[in-house]
Amino acid sequence: MSNLLVVDLGNTNLVLGVYRGDELVSSWRLATARERTADEYGILARQLVGDALHAELEGAIVASVVPPLNGAMAFMVQKYFGIEPLFVEPGVKTGIAIHVDNPFEVGADRIVNCAAAHDKYGGPTVIVDFGTATTFDVVTANAEFIGGVIAPGLNVSAEALFARAARLPRIDVKRPERAIGTNTVSNMQSGLYFGYLGLVDGILSRIKRELPELKRIVATGGLASLFAEESEYIDEIDAELTLKGLKIIYDRNRVSRRARR
């Protein structure tokens, strides 16, 4: 059975996964480092994927929101895996119609998430992706991306607070036991956690008012588990949603890619 390498290249994390058939057998999360060379990425990827899986790789697909690293990713996949990767970009069949003012502005990861969510849940569905930025994306029952919301990510907010307030320390963001903190760290944790939870639920409340027929709200991304259980509106977490979407889009383009060969 052939394997597929899926790559989600974000501003904070690079997520690699390997599918064997329709099963995601392994995935890994690395820090995105713009100064890292293609060879450094390649050595790490080969060590993670392993010789056994590498020998059976049929293809690779990349969703990137970091254009300066696209060349390094393409070179890395070609050199270390012997495969020309498919990038999710204009012209690729995603199964999602993009109904916004400027479709070229929409990040590849957002369309990939919509493809996966619509395939599993139908629509209208909202995907909340907790990453460097937190995005709220709406896909309709007819597989149309009709827009959404972009908010600063939680870690971005925490770093801004640390950077701009001289007497406030850098802290780990986690759910505090109570809203009223008794020291500086617990004060900050409360403000960041409950403040951000309020942002998430406030935006979702407004989206629900605009979309009364909404069926599902799905959370994904590195910090999804921190908020999904506390949120009044998030229905479930799907940590592998983006990787699933990459597999779906690769399959939709497989026939045309074979024809070009």
Image (cartoon, helix red, strand yellow):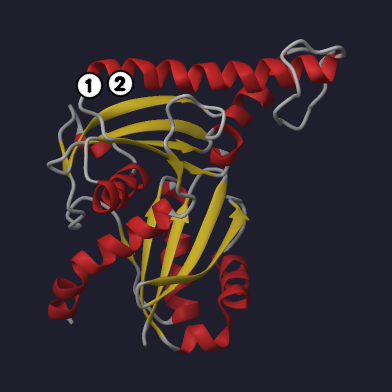
Q: Is residue 127 left or right of residue 195?
A: left
On the image, the x and y values in percent for residue 218 come to: 40, 39
Mark 2 secondary-structure assignment = helix
Query: Which residue is rendered at x = 66% and y = 20% of the image?
Result: 192
**What residue is rendered at 62% in x and 67% in y?**
40
Q: Quadrant of residue 5?
A: bottom left
Q: Does residue 123 appear to the left or right of 238 in the view shown?
A: left
Q: Locate residue 88: give its quadrant.
A: bottom left
> Where is mark 2, residue-wise?
208
On the image, which quarter does residue 251 sit in? Answer: bottom left
Distance CA(mark 1)–CA(mark 2): 6 Å
Callout 2 amino acid? Lys
Q: Tag 2: Cα neighbours inside 10 Å, few (<14), some, or many (≥20)?
A: some
Residue type, numbered disc 1:
Pro
- Residue drawn at (50%, 44%), measured in percent from left and top? 221
Examine the rendered structure and indicate whether residue 25 appears above or below residue 225.
below
Q: Are marks 1 and 2 in contact (CB under 8 Å)?
A: yes
* Residue ID at (81%, 16%): 168
Tell me where residue 163 appears, x and y as whole percent: 72, 20
The residue singled out by tag 1 in the image is: 212
Counting from the top left corner in percent of width and height, residue 98 is at 17, 39
Above/below status of 45 relative to 139: below
**How many numbered markers are drawn?**
2
Q: Position of residue 208 (x, y in %)?
A: 30, 21
